[in-house]
Amino acid sequence: MGSVSHYSERCAPYGLLFIYGLDQIGDFKMRAAWILMALWMMASTGWAAGRVEGRVGQRSAQTYLDGAAVRIPALRLETATRSDGRFSFPNVPTGTHHLEVRYIGYQAYRQQITVAEGQVAQVPVTLTNTIEEIVVYGQASSTASALNQQRSSDSITSIVSSDEFGQLPDANLSEALQRIPGVFLERDQGEGRFVGVRGIDPNLNVTSINGVALTSPENNTRAVALDIIPTELLENIEVRKSFTPDMDPNGIGGSINVKSLSAFDRKGRFYKMKAEGGYNELEEKMSPRVSGVFSDTFNLGEGNDNFGVALAVSWFDRKFGSDNVMTDGGWPADLETTANEEFKGAEEVEYRNHEVNRERLGTALNLDFRPNDNAQYYIRTLYSKFSDQEYRTREEFKLDKGDAIAATATSATWDDAELHRELKDRFEKQEILSATAGGTSWFNQWTADYRYGYSKSLEKEPNRTDSEFEIEGLQIGYSDIGRTPALFTDPLTLDPDNYELSEITVEDNDTEDEQHSLQFDLQREFDSRNFTGFVKAGVKVSRREKSNDAQIVVYDGFPGDPSLTPFVGDSPDYGEGDFGPGISKSAMSTFIADNRALFDIDDDDSLAGSLGGDYEMGEDVNAAYAMSRVDSGKLRMVFGLRYEETDFEAKGQRILFDDVSGNGDPVLQPVTFSDSYSSFLPSINLRYAFSDDLILRAAWYESFARPSFGDLSPGGEIEFETDDGESELKAETGNPLLHPLEATNLDISLEHYDSGIGVLSAGVFYKKLENFIVSANVAASTDLTQFVGNAAVDTAEVLQPINGDNADLLGFEAAWVKQFIHLPAPWNGLMLSANATFTDSEAHLALRPGSIDLPRQSDMVVNFMLGYENERFSARVATTYKSDALLRLEEPDDPAFDVYQDAHVQLDLSIKYNINNNWQVYFEGNNLTNEPFYAYFDSRRFNATYETYGRSYALGVQYRAQ
């Protein structure tokens, strides 16, 4: 059994994967490094005397326990149970030993085991809770599961279980994540979309499902808007804030891994069904939602159940909206009245009313096959479809089209200005498919993991139409400024016959992002007199392709020059001002369908819009790593090195409007770029256990984040014209030659786990960022012939994202989770969760002296939840707070145009009542204080965006059985 030849025979299938990975690696250095790692992993062929395997469950529920600490103290062996409660020790000397199992909230378990030469000792473990049954029935068990997984982790990690994020009105994955320490949320239409970690831009995090990195359906970002994924499809969420070499390192803030449900995570058959009706206060409309989860295990041969099926389906048809006041272009300080008096004012202000019907459909199907104790195989799939039907009515006060005749610090009046009314009719569909197939094999002290991953996402906007009417010669303005500038209009704007149809834009937009990956990991356990642990190495290859295609037609002439009168609809129900006449959706759609062939086309704008943003990108990544975990007494070290090589290619088209050496007609300039770069990424994670309940962690690691696709896009628009006898070039393009943002990260934290159920933790982290990406005028250092050939250029402005700047981020993180289980009844159902993250950053820009905050970084993020639960009743109130943050730089060289998001506080409520062990009714309230979104230019006095959403409520029923 211990011969090398027998070992080789058993490894033959995995050797094929090694060969495939090796074949994908073209670089000699990486190929050689991988061969050396493979030889190093195969070098040791000694065998353990026996193997110990088991499974940890709980007496009071039909679930297994994830993250339980399992030890053989005399041999200094320690491991943690997986999600299905399984554990194994592959290298145990023959003889009699004592095995211990510890799990927060349960009595310690001890058992004597006997290990025989070349045999497997099976050890089933059933734990007894130390707390009252009524508490285990509810939130306490799910909190205990998350805390045990966090305690046993080799890195700095936060975990939320499915039962935990089902306790609050979190409609999607991003809203569930906002409860985790250090995580902040960015919202759209009042609903959580993008997630950031530790003050870092969501673009700079990596999100994966079942270990497979998600692709992004949007055309300009790598960040995945996690509102597309319903929470019902998930088992737990893991946010890892420090990295180990076996992880994808392309994340600066952290790595978010979502695990979907598996049938083996529970005992036997399980199913849950939920139905609810929601109500949005602003739109006064109902929203239905239904979901179902089913899992079961079956016996496909002799022995125990070895095949599992888990299925989840979720559907949500949400009707909601928002009212918005927006200032476009900022508040310039150099405006002048007709009397030549300078003032600081707005040039364009908009009223916007949004009506949205957002539908989500999500499904997950997972299959597991475990033919014996030495192997398991799985298929994990998740499909989510997200669609928006949005109608946006917009009233645009085009102040800068007229002449300012009077102005003060808080008011201004323009004469001969314009007012535009616009209807946007947009249907948008996003889809994400994630699938992975793989397995794990155990043989003696070796473990082999192998996985193929596939992810595809898309976004489509078919037949989007924007229709615009305008009226000229108006006296309009604002009588006050602040969060919602008080606008006034001319009486002429109330008569729809005074408006003329000026423009209709019809778009068909299509974005696709597809990635294949193949990964193989091999791990060998070892033990000596002073050390235990494992060595591990692996290879991963991934191939990603992303494309964006826009088909845009701009119409600017219409038969009969129609006015607004034939298209008048009901005035929008708008709470921030007098909106005036609306535009009928049906009348506008009928008119376009019947007369489109007669419209005049603006060829230049149509061509520029259709081709300037199109691209095809390919990203090939080859990676290899080697690492080790060493346990010595109370100290655990996880250290190693990862190497990644990236080959990138981008194709697109620039649009040149040349009035100097051409006739001004648009000229297409096809462009192709390619780039290659490599990264060596060392890391070390330390874990020192003063006791089972007090753990000190420290980490140092290198990580990086590849640039967003919007910054890498090779296309753009170029204008070359004559001004006062001089040739002037203006260009704005992407930069496919950007290198990734790199980070050196330091972490230290202390965690104290309560003897009941709870944890108190605090930590400090520091990030040194290099190659920080900013937009800059690079005309002085750019070869201008790529735009206009050999034509003479007198003045030039070329705006492009570039590398070269740096930033520092320092933060402090604290969390307290407590289940008050030892208080006298009825107070023993109290629970509390509180966490806060404080960060401070400095980023340096090429076009600005001094420093700024990192974009989208808030100095303080706070989450607080207070709840109570007994066998029948539970209630939770939760609040989240995020301090103000720099959102974006409208003009990199002028701080007056920096856009900040104001501080945001949101209050949510959940009340549940258990009719019996199976049936539950619940009520949820979201955004109970009707907190608006507010962004401003430089000072809170100067509106950028003010948007309200209203409160939302839900009443539902759930059936659960096992």
Image (tube, grey):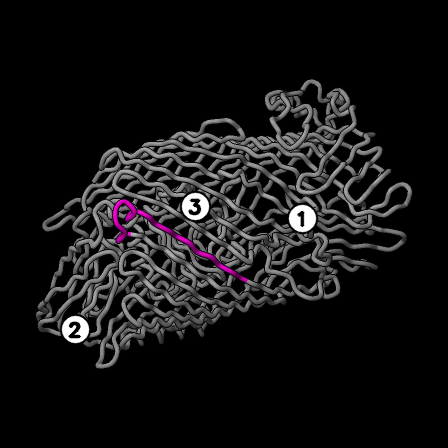
Q: Residues at badges 1 and 2 in contact (C-beta under 8 Å)? A: no
User: Pointer 1: what residue?
Assistant: 940
* The C terminus, quarter of image: top left
Q: Earlier in the sequence, mark 3 or mark 1?
A: 3
Distance of label 2 from label 3 (alpha carbons):
51 Å
Q: Amino acid at mark 3?
A: Ala
Distance of label 1 from label 2 (alpha carbons):
68 Å
Q: Residue furthest right?
A: 339
Element type where label 1 sits in the image: loop
- Residue at 67% x, 48% y: name it: 940
Element type where label 3 sits in the image: strand
User: Pointer 3: what residue?
Assistant: 878
User: Pointer 2: what residue?
Assistant: 48
Report the magenta residues as a range.
Answer: 821-839
Q: 715 and 398: which one is in front?
A: 398
Q: 417 and 91: which one is in front?
A: 417
Q: Residues at badges 3 and 1 in contact (C-beta under 8 Å)? A: no
Q: Earlier in the sequence, mark 2 or mark 3?
A: 2
Residue 634: image x %, image y %? 29, 74
Q: Is residue 555 left or right of residue 442?
A: right
Tell me if residue 516 can be seen: no
Distance of label 3 from label 1 (alpha carbons):
27 Å
Q: Is residue 372 left or right of residue 865?
A: left
